[in-house]
Amino acid sequence: MNRVTSIDALRGFDMLMLCGGAATLRLLLLWSGDGAMPEAVAEQFEHAAYGGDFTCWDMVMPLFIFITGASMPFAFGKYREKGGEHWRWGTAWRVLRRVVLLFVLGMLVQGNLAGAHAEHMSLFCNTLQAIAEGYLIAAAVLMFCGLRGQIITCLGCMAAYWALLRFVPFGGHAGGVFEPDCNLAIYIDHLLQGRWQDGTPYSWILTALSFGALTLMGSICGQLIRQRQGLRTAGILCGIGAAAIAAALLLEYDTPLIKHIYTTTAVLWSGGWCIMLLALFHVLFDCSGSAMSKAAMPLQVFGCNALLAYLLTEIHGPHGHNIWWGVAHPLVYGLAGRAQEAAPLVHAALSLLLLWLVLLFLYRNKTFLRV
């Protein structure tokens, strides 16, 4: 796949925040504010409560799903060029293999798969599995439909999910109920997963329609970038993003914005901001000459090995610490301890720097973990 600077950099920015960038920034703000920070700012570093306002931290997951879609037109273009007349057969195998691996890795990260105790495992519980669902839907559309078909399918997924949640009765309840433990999406998860459901108000099975729509949003935007029309593309992206945000604000009068079950309102809201971010990164790194393109390298280091960085910082051992903490802590705790009040900040910053240096070594040696 031909690398696209803006897409790699945006993926890297998202991963940087997840792998310690947000935590380091939060500690920096606390340290500079003598241990305090405005409540409105502090809320942006936490997930919103069910039905609460969408926070910056809530953008991490949809941005991953969106960026997966944005990179797909480039990869599928390569499959089409090299696969010949029957390119779809080889592509279908790649897609199915990737979906299975992402699903298993998701169980490994949050589903207690490594514990080998079935009673403690969860089937659907992780962002990687949401990516797998969205990728599967978008891949099927990309293999058989052009841009118009992708737009129609994206809108169709959102409309179908909205109508199902809004009008279909379930378990003795009328349609249109959006309570944490009483809505159609979570009802279907309980019904189909049984004891394999993770016990949270997050839904995954019916919500695949939302994940598919968000992935297709990314795919549509990726195709616009692939046309290489520079600032004109950025303007179109800004227009689409603004329209999606406006649609979310209008739809909220009918359907609440709930990211736990990814209502259509939440898809439009988060997708709109994802598109705006992509437009910004496209202007900064694709349209501003070689100097700015080179400036994207620190983010590309994370973006080109996003899966590896995610697994290192999200897979936790029996004592609650992630894999990377076990590597970095023995190397930085002594120096961090000398910083006294700033010790947590120094520890987080040095751990993040060490991770970046490892990923930089892999980046320069063109070694990437992919599925």
Image: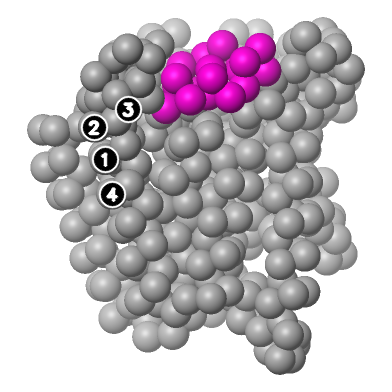
Residue at x-position 19% and y-position 57%: 243
Range of residues picked out in magenta: 185-202
Residue at x-position 31% and y-position 58%: 155
Give the foreground label among 4 and 2.
2
Q: Please say if the residues under marks 1 and 3 sit with CB atoms less than 8 Å apart.
A: no
Disc with the residue nearer the chain's start (3 vs 2): 2
Q: Decide if residue 280 is on the left or right side of residue 27.
A: left
Which residue is denoted by mark 1 in the rendering?
Answer: 163
Q: Is residue 177 magenta?
A: no
Give the foreground label among 1 and 3.
1
Q: Please say if the residues under marks 4 and 1 sit with CB atoms less than 8 Å apart.
A: yes
Query: Residue 120: x, y in percent?
Result: 76, 10
Is residue 6 visible in this depiction of the protein?
Answer: no
The image shows residue 213, relative to residue 142, as above or below, that is above
Q: Residues within 10 Å of mark 3 (few under 14, many from 20)?
A: many
Which residue is denoted by mark 4 in the rendering?
Answer: 159
Q: Label 3 vs label 2: CA separation?
A: 17 Å
Residue at x-position 89% and y-position 17%: 116
The label number, if any, that marks residue 167 in the structure image:
2
Q: Please say if the residues under marks 1 and 2 sit with CB atoms less than 8 Å apart.
A: yes
Q: Please say if the residues under marks 4 and 2 sit with CB atoms less than 8 Å apart.
A: no
Q: Amino acid at mark 4?
A: Ala
Dot 2 falls on a residue whose secondary structure is helix
Which residue is denoted by mark 3 in the rendering?
Answer: 258
Give the foreground label among 3 and 2.
2
Q: Amino acid at mark 1?
A: Ala
Q: Residues within 10 Å of mark 2 (few under 14, many from 20)?
A: few
